[in-house]
Image (cartoon, helix red, strand yellow):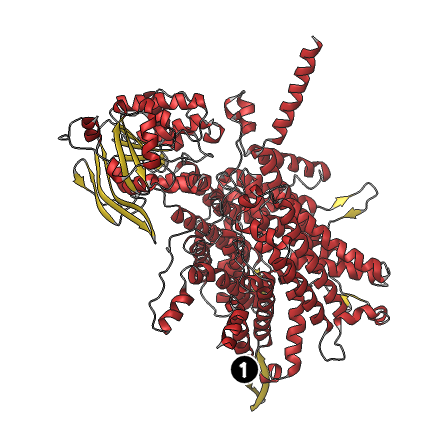
Amino acid sequence: MSDRSAFRALFAGYGWEIGLLVFMALLYAAGTLINPDFFGDFHALRATLRDAARFGVMAVGMTFVIVNRDLDLSVGSTLGLVAVVFSLLYAPAHYDLGLGWTVAGALGVGLAIGLVNGVLVTFLQVPAFIATLTMLFIGRGLVLGLTGGKTIAYDAKAAESAFFAIGEANPLGFNNQILVFVAIAAVGALLLARTRWGYESYAVGGNLQAAEFAGIDTRIVRIRGFVLASLCAAVAGIMNVAQDKGVTSQYGQGAELIVIAAVIVGGASILGGRGRVVGSCLGAILVVLIDKVLREGVPTVRVIKIGGVDMQVQAMAQLPPGAVPAFLGLILVAAVLIEPLVLRRRLPQRLWAWLRGHTPPPAEDADGVAMVGIKTMGHSVQAREFSGGLVNRLLARREAAAVLFMVALWLVGMWLRPDFWGSLDNSFNLLLAFTEVGLLAVGMTFVIVNGDIDLSVGAVLALSGATAAFLMKTLGADPGFAILAAFVVGTAAGAMNGLLATRARLPAFVATLGMFYIARGLAAWMVAGRQLSQFPESFGLLGRKLIEPLQALGLAPAPGTLAFKIAGALSTQTLMLAVIAVVAAVVLARIRWGWACYATGGNPRAAGYAGIDTDRVRFAALVFSAMCAAVAGIVYVAFLRSFNPSAGQLRELDAIAAVIIGGGSIFGGYGSVIGSLAGAAVIALIRALLSLQIIGADGQSFVMPQHWVNVFIGLILIVAVLGDIWLRQQAVLGRLLGRLTMRRRASRSAAT
Amino acid sequence: MSETETPIVEMRNICKAFGAVRALHNVNFRLMPGEVLGLVGDNSAGKSTLMKILTGAYHRDSGDVLVSGAATQFRSPQDSRDSGIEMIYQDFALCGNMDVGQNIFLGRWPRRGLFVDKKRMYSDAEAVLKRLKVDVNSVRQRVESLSGGRQQSVAIARAISFEPQVVILDEPTANLSVMATNELLRTMQELKEHGVAQVIISHRLTDIFEVGDRVMVLKRGENVGDRYIDHTSEKEVLELIVEGTPETALTADQARAAA
């Protein structure tokens, strides 16, 4: 009897972790059954544990961040960047430094990224998902820029050093990385569960304000979380190069998804204040195991005919490259949904009571605490609109900066390349580049005005494009049907975003982050990771000059007339953008439904009291955003006459940056379609300027490589968000100016 | 006021429990047309719960709610609004990013055809503010750039634009300066002259004694007192708040008769 109670006491409160272990055992058994060649072998278990070790190390750091109620999307890029920096410093072909300097440099990069993330999120008040998402793309750009997309290897030099044993198997038969993992997990677990640092994290994540009032320096606690996450990612990066003795530009891609999913699966709450290192480590092993099961595939026997003879061929039914994230994204969403749908309704306790024939405990109020985080409202803006003349009033409008910026950038282009910039060709190319960003930005405006965010627009663009391409190419579908289906699929993705955000009450960035991976994974799956091209030309008409579809319909104006010239110069998609933008602008600025968006973003509770169905407004905006992305995806395929699985990559950054530059607030309540279009123009112009061929005085020409352009766009987004928070909302400039003039006045009055 | 007149709001034997916590127990509440009633009590006395049951934000476990003598079953604040009951929340429930006019007509912006009729909205908003004798620079000014007192004026203007018969003010002076409080008390007097009955949930007895007609005391979810302002003192009300019992409840008329 006492044995049983001691046993119970030991495991009390660890039900979740025990459940994970049982589930893992079942999953491994299933893997053995399906693919005995791989999973039946003991090596497989070791390989799984070896790979899980790196993700486990990252999960330890991420646990601190998530317990703090933050999120770090940049860990995958940090791993990649650290691995690249390590390799560059160490490789004989590059800097050829000693091991000490190399490791110090690599850890230094990790530390720096963590500090930048932390300072952006705490002192500069940038939402964590925006700051770290930007860091993700900047990191990836740097990795590509530094490696030039090439592999760096240094087997010979590595063989001389004992350090690289970290990545090797030891005499006991398992990889040393597992030891590193266990050591870091033990330290992390102690830190979180037994020290003040850990207690401070739980306090900050549970109730930030209460923690602050209690005298905890919450900013330090949150920066510490980001630094720990980045350092853990750096350690994982070093483990990775120790194993491979080289690096490619693909390192760590999508790792953040596995790590975040691992921590949430491990029992942490995306809303902070709950989570354990043990759970996160088990979660990491489980997610890596799922990843392996998905990637290894199922052995099948295919019968093919060769010269009239049936031949049996051993083959693997595998997922195409890029498709696995679709499942991992689903796991992330499912894991995040466990809290509102299962835990809050006390399903396990009720089930257990029901099984034992007891009366089940009551479910908590289903409509109790909303899962949407507390909003940080924008600070008061001075009512400048009412002072000063017409020019002042125009400048005080939030769109003003974007319009001025747009004009200035165009002039810069004119100054750099007067021979080319103003030409008709370049102008129409600019307009085309503008169309895609513009479409996404129009949809994003509604979402951001509501105080939500849609991180999935680029992926939904790819999903719709892939749907159209797949239907026409593989199934030979009619172009009209393909367009309809692509639009419906994109809309459905938006509906899922909306349902997760309103019904399940997940923060929008979590809901759309899941879709970010799911949609892109599905797109890659449909086209099997390849580029598809050669579609019926009637489909391509959507991406041509207006004259072509008109001619195809027999409606073309007579050659030589003005209408003919306009139709010959104007692109169909530009016209589509114009129509969508005008309708959207009128809806947002002049119709009750649009105003309901402003009310929802400004104060959702007040809007609710006033009888506005805020859930419906937010749902509709997320669906509309996905619809715009779907149209952009269809246009993408029509214009390029091909579909590449990387379509729309980084477009979510472009669209968010466009809306923020155009006067939107990342905290909701502000934004306009015209401003967002001006912002989209700014983004298109910056991209065009950065990829402009500069011809120097000596006739030398220079073009910036594309990945550096991406780094730059990431920086622009951060600058735009910072500008919005500090210049527009806090009016830092105005206050500084006010203080200066006051001082001057004071000194003047003192002089008289 | 005689017993024969029909109260604008009457609540009988209201009970409400949150899980094991008994928030209200057989509470009776009566409000006459045009009357200003102070609803006082310690924290967790059940003041806000009672008012939220009246507006339909909470659902009662048992008891009756009558508005102008007719039994009601409000499912949401929208239902009670249709019966002429408005509540002004402690934090005003305004959208800081929108202007005064937009906030006064939040969610029911006047339309002409498909579009919002801005001209009518702003002129109507100005009319409402004028009726309240409230001075706001411009109806096109953003609410977040207004002071706390002005913001409350907008919230009150919003409430009375529904032409309500009853306005409930939740801790109206909690976020206001002394100046703004005096302004608010003047506005409440103005409302009273327009025949609007008001319920003030407040901790500050001074305010209630300045504008109120009657004061009702709750303690741990039960009636413990009901007095006319003219026949009581702050001292007596304080005693009721601290050591009142159901026996001290009486009705205001009984208390006056006993005095």
Q: Position of residue A476 (x, y in %)?
A: 48, 69
Q: Circle 1 is placed at which residue position?
A: A34
Question: Circle 1 — which element?
Answer: helix
Q: Determine whether A291 is above or below B124 in the image.
A: below
Residue occupying the far bottom of the picture = A309
Quadrant location of residue A81? bottom right
Residue occupying the far left of the picture = B4
Quadrant location of residue A143? bottom right
Number of marks present in the image shown: 1
Residue occupying the far top of the picture = A752
Q: Position of residue A568 (x, y in %)?
A: 53, 46
User: Which residue is painted at 15% across and 30% down in the image?
Assistant: B3
Q: Position of residue A327 (x, y in %)?
A: 53, 67
User: Which residue is painted at 63% across and 49% down in the image?
Assistant: A221
| Of the pair A100 and A643, the residue shown nearer to us | A100
* 10 Å crowding of disc 1: few (<14), some (14-19), many (20+): some
Residue type for callout 1:
Ile
Quadrant including the C terminus of chain A: top right
Q: Position of residue B73 (x, y in %)?
A: 23, 45
User: Could you tell me if residue A106 is visible in this image?
Assistant: yes
